[in-house]
């Protein structure tokens, strides 16, 4: 059995190397939450990162953007050419207009496609059998007064691979991403907190159920908790009632967000919060 | 360069450091949620004793505090760093310093040179997303960023040390400035290498708008205001008229710098903090000779012409 497994592994490794030589290294799209409500706007920031790695080629890259609504349905796709060393600063409201929708929130996933000249060099990558190319990007969230928050993408489209051979894509996409019990590594000050919303996204390809809540530092006390079920790519913005926050006792001094479980390996929620009349902020949980 | 199976003569105060800049002159206090992320059921679990170092803007080590707390495996705690600086170093509340929290395995307490297993070290570094929270001293702004700082500027962990920073996060408008905090740190107190970052601010179409450079002394950081750089180049108004957005493209060939971006509304004090992403986030196996070749091309393309380090533009409050 071990010999058979080794043989399979060797065959797969050679297939990946050959794919890299043909410029077909698997690519993965990162995903971000967007919001065009609550007084907030969202703007995508993505650079043509291929230029930095292959500056010798004066070629653009093509950003393929998928838009999903809060219910997980695919609304549309959009393509943007990014010049060499250029950047895309794309207002989400303009993106939504371009695909004929005005949904107030949802997700976008982006795969940056390299030019053929760049793909020809993929065979020279270190460890070509293990190489993958990702498209991480940033979302700037801001209000009418230009109060900004930046969040970098941390989760990818599950079981979806671009730019490679079908058998490799099939091989890579067999195992779904699995999440675990999770508590945020950020402690939030209880004092002054007036608003708290937790955006939970199912980045996976199967429906999932999770408990979302607010807990004491040591997890001994549950201050808020609700269970939600989400379809693939669906999101839910869970608003912790302000009157409930006001009723929380002064102790614990610090609280933390939690999900049990995360619906994918790194599917941490986005957290919107407000302190003492300040602007809304947004960050990963 | 393959990692060694054991690292000897390792200072355990850099076992899994948490390194961050203070932004006191800009009017923010700092709180840090620090964790002992390796849980009790894992092989590498250990109790941490935690102390704090501070370094002034020249990189001078102002000292190291006695133990400020202990963390059991899986525990986290939030620390008010301004209070700790006041208590242990007596600093002026506006004085900006670089801070290092030192989580040290209890078995290494009091020691300055030990032998460590890199696997154990990395197990702790990989789960060390400490949250650095900046809060307005007066007002409702609470923000921050989580990141890891592992083994940096140590010849035992990498034979060549360079930094390429590509950050399409420059936003400059009338009320908004984007600053880059560039930290030059190591996991050895004797580290003494200043690092220079050459950089361009590029426009959305990749055009070159302004170039500058900054030298960062060891164990310090510099705040580069992109507004100041654009103004110095005489292109600030044009840049704003063109949309006020672009990319920071930086290159250091003599050391590793840790870049953080800070997009700040100078009127409200709202501040977006984030780290940039290293090359392996984009191309998972990037490194080795390929990286060196690409860096050399990038240098020829953008930084071939020598530029003396400019006066460091530090944003005024």
Image (cartoon, helix red, strand yellow):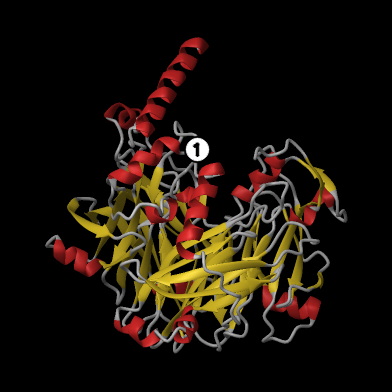
Res. B314 image quadrant:
bottom right
Kindly tell me whether residue A222 is visible in this rendering: no
In this rendering, is residue A90 above or below A230? below
**x, y percentage for residue B99?**
70, 70
Residue B51 percent coordinates (x, y): 77, 64
Front residue (pair B140, A67): A67
- Judged from the image, the secondary structure of the residue bearing numbered disc 1 is loop
| In-image side of A174 versus A3 (left or right) | left
Chain ID of residue with mark 1: A
Query: On screen, B69 above or below A59?
Result: below
Residue at 50% of width from left, 69% of height from top? B199
Residue A80, image x, y percentages:
23, 58
Provide the residue designation for mark 1. Answer: A126
Above or below, B285 against B274 in this view is above
Position of residue A203 in the picture relative to residue B104 (left or right): left
Residue A168 in sight in this render? yes
Q: How busy is the neighbourhood of tag 1: few (under 14 within 10 Å), some, or many (20 plus)? A: some
In front of the other: A139 or A251: A139
Residue at 75 percent of width and 50 percent of height: B47
Residue A122 appears left or right of B129: left
The quarter of the picture where the C terminus of chain B appears is: bottom right
């Amino acid at each position: 059995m071990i010999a058979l497994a080794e043989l399979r592994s060797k065959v797969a490794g050679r297939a990946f190397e050959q794919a890299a030589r043909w410029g077909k290294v698997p690519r993965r799209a990162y995903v971000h939450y967007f919001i065009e409500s609550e007084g907030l706007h969202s703007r995508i920031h993505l650079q043509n990162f291929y230029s930095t790695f292959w500056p010798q080629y004066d070629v653009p890259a093509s950003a393929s953007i998928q838009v999903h609504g809060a219910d997980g349905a695919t609304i549309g796709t959009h393509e943007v050419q990014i010049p060499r060393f250029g950047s895309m600063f794309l207002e989400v409201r303009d993106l939504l207009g371009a695909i004929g929708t005005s949904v107030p929130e949802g997700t976008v996933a982006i795969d940056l496609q390299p030019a053929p000249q760049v793909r020809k060099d993929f065979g020279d990558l270190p460890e070509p059998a293990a190489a993958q190319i990702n498209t991480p990007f940033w979302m700037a969230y801001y209000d009418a007064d230009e109060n900004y928050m930046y969040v970098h993408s941390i989760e990818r489209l599950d079981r979806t691979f671009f730019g490679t051979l079908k058998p490799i894509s099939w091989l890579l996409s067999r195992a779904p991403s699995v999440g675990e019990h999770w508590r945020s590594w950020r402690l939030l000050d209880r004092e002054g907190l007036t608003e708290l919303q937790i955006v939970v996204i199912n980045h996976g390809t199967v429906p999932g159920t999770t408990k979302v809540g607010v807990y004491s530092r040591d997890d001994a006390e549950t201050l808020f908790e609700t269970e939600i079920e989400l379809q693939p790519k669906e999101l839910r913005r869970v608003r912790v009632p302000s009157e409930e926050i006001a009723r929380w006792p002064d102790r614990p001094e610090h609280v933390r967000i939690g999900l049990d479980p995360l619906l994918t390996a790194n599917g941490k929620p986005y957290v919107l919060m407000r302190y003492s009349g300040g602007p809304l902020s947004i960050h990963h949980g | 360069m393959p990692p060694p199976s054991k690292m000897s003569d390792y200072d355990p105060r850099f076992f899994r450091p948490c390194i961050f800049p203070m932004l006191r002159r800009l009017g923010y206090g700092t709180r840090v949620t620090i964790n002992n992320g390796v849980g009790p059921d894992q092989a590498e679990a250990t109790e941490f004793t935690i102390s704090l170092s501070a370094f002034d803007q020249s990189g001078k080590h102002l000292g190291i505090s006695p133990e400020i707390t202990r963390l059991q495996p899986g525990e986290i705690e939030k620390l008010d760093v301004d209070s700790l600086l006041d208590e242990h170093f007596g600093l002026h509340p506006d004085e900006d310093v670089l801070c290092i929290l030192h989580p040290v395995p209890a078995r290494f307490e009091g020691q300055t040179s030990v032998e460590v297993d890199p696997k154990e070290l990395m197990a702790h570094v990989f789960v060390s997303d400490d949250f650095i929270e900046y809060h307005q001293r007066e007002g409702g702004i609470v923000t921050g960023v989580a990141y890891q700082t592992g083994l940096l500027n140590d010849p035992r962990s990498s034979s060549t040390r360079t930094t390429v920073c590509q950050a399409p996060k420059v936003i400059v408008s009338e009320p908004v400035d984007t600053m880059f905090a560039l930290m030059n740190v190591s996991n050895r107190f004797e580290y003494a290498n200043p690092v220079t970052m050459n950089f361009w601010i590029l426009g959305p179409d990749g055009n070159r708008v302004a170039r500058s450079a900054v030298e960062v002394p060891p164990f310090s950081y510099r705040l580069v205001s992109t507004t100041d750089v654009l103004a110095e180049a005489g292109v600030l108004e044009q840049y704003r008229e063109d949309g006020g957005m672009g990319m920071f493209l930086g290159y250091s060939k003599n050391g590793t710098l840790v870049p953080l971006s800070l997009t700040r509304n100078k009127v409200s004090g709202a501040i977006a903090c984030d780290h940039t992403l290293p090359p392996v986030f984009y191309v998972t196996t990037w490194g080795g000779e390929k990286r060196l070749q690409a860096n050399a091309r990038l240098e020829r393309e953008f930084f071939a012409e020598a530029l003396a380090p400019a006066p460091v533009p530090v944003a005024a409050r």
